[in-house]
Image: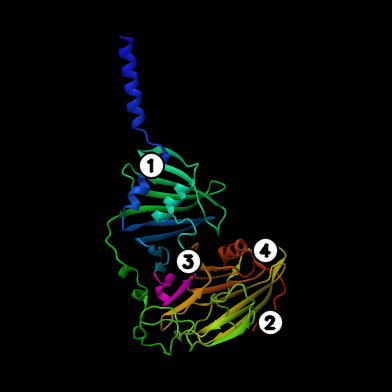
Amino acid sequence: MKKFLCLCCTILLLTTGCGKKSSVDVVKEFSSRVNDTKSYVLKGTMEIYSDEDTFTYSVEANYLKDNYYKVKLVNQTNNHEQVILRNQDGVYVITPSLNKSFKFQSEWPNNSSQSYLLKAIITDLEKDAETSMETVDSKYVIKSKVNYPNNSDLSYQKVTLDKDMNLNKVEVYNSSDALKIKVNVGSIDLKAGLSDSDFKLEDYVKEPQDNPNNNTSNSNNATSNGNNNSNDSNTNSNECKEGDKDCKPNVACDPKKEDCTEKNTTSKDKTTGVLEDIVYPLYIPSNTYLSGKDKVDTDNGERVILTFGGDKNFVLVEEVAVASNEFEIIPVYGDPLMLNDTIAALSENSLYWTSNQVSYYLAGNDLTTEEILNIAKNMNQSSSVVSGNVSNEK
């Protein structure tokens, strides 16, 4: 009788143990399911939390084996659409409304965590030898470290999978356990049947005749096949120094050089762009102050150049975002970056972004990447948040 009872207990324990999966088992099963797919389409929403503000995007991520990606992000507040595209030619951030794209020399998305890309999520789960897991409402919630090189405060993620290994949700937290990014997955098609023709830059190129009211001139930045021709012999350049009021800084500049080059890119919409308000940063580094404010007339309207001096010298340029008549490609030595309500172009010591129909360019050799991002994230319509003697206003 005792032997029979022991045998029953042993069977019961083995049965119970076999039904319980470890975090390693779940990650392996999830990884195997994703790696078996040749292409997928993920749709959902992403929320970015910045202090008291929440920025919500609709997200559609397309993937094709051999490292093809197309991520469509639409800001649900202002319907601002941007597309991150990676194909055989490079990495692009496209803003269809401006008929413009940045082309990056970048390893994106393989050089950082991405909360809406399955491969990036799996990489984080597999790299962390200390992953932990809990079961909540019959779903697996796996906690792992993340890798955001340009935001060291983002510390870990919680990945929620259902019992069939479908991704439900990804939450990214900072070191203080505050939720900073949340992706809710609406649907995933692991048999999407995509091909490389679904990842063409040309799909976003608007031909000049689409804008009949615009004046047209020769463009040297895009051709019908979408290749970057910024180095063609018909490209004119004028060297200028950062801070020169007659120079429009360009993120295409080599950040390791003191001089920047303004590319003669393409004709633009001639609608006069007058800034209704000058936007000042709520944050500036200590012992740094506004030392100059210039207004310069351009072919497209008005450009404002704010110069900051002190311990951390930098320049902030603002102008109304105007759509290009012909598709414009701007080369960038850096990476695409989510910046609250937009995708920015980040280089070693500069940042370019467009928000609420205003284009910004921030550059300073004295600034760290963290300081650049803090300045950009803390922009406000107030005109009295900076101090110092302002001169040279024109």
Using the numbered discs, state the Cα–Cα distance from disc 1 to disc 4 in whole angstroms: 45 Å
Q: Which residue is mark 4?
A: 285
Using the numbered discs, state the Cα–Cα distance from disc 3 to disc 1 in whole angstroms: 33 Å
Q: Position of residue 350 (x, y in %)?
A: 58, 70
Figure quadrant of residue 227: bottom left
Magenta highlight range = 88-105
In the displayed structure, would residue 74 be above or below residue 297? above
Label 2 environment density (alpha carbons within 10 Å; few <14, some 14–19, many ≥20):
few
Using the numbered discs, state the Cα–Cα distance from disc 2 to disc 1 in whole angstroms: 63 Å
Q: Position of residue 322 (x, y in %)?
A: 46, 79
Q: Which residue is mark 2?
A: 392
Quadrant (top left/top right/bottom left/bottom right) for the C terminus = bottom right
Whichever of labels 2 and 4 marks the residue nearer the N terminus, that label is 4
Q: Which residue is mark 1?
A: 26
Quadrant (top left/top right/bottom left/bottom right) for the N terminus = top left
The image's mark for residue 2 is none
Q: Position of residue 390 (x, y in %)?
A: 69, 76
Whichever of labels 3 and 2 marks the residue nearer the N terminus, that label is 3
Number of the front mark, 1 or 4:
1
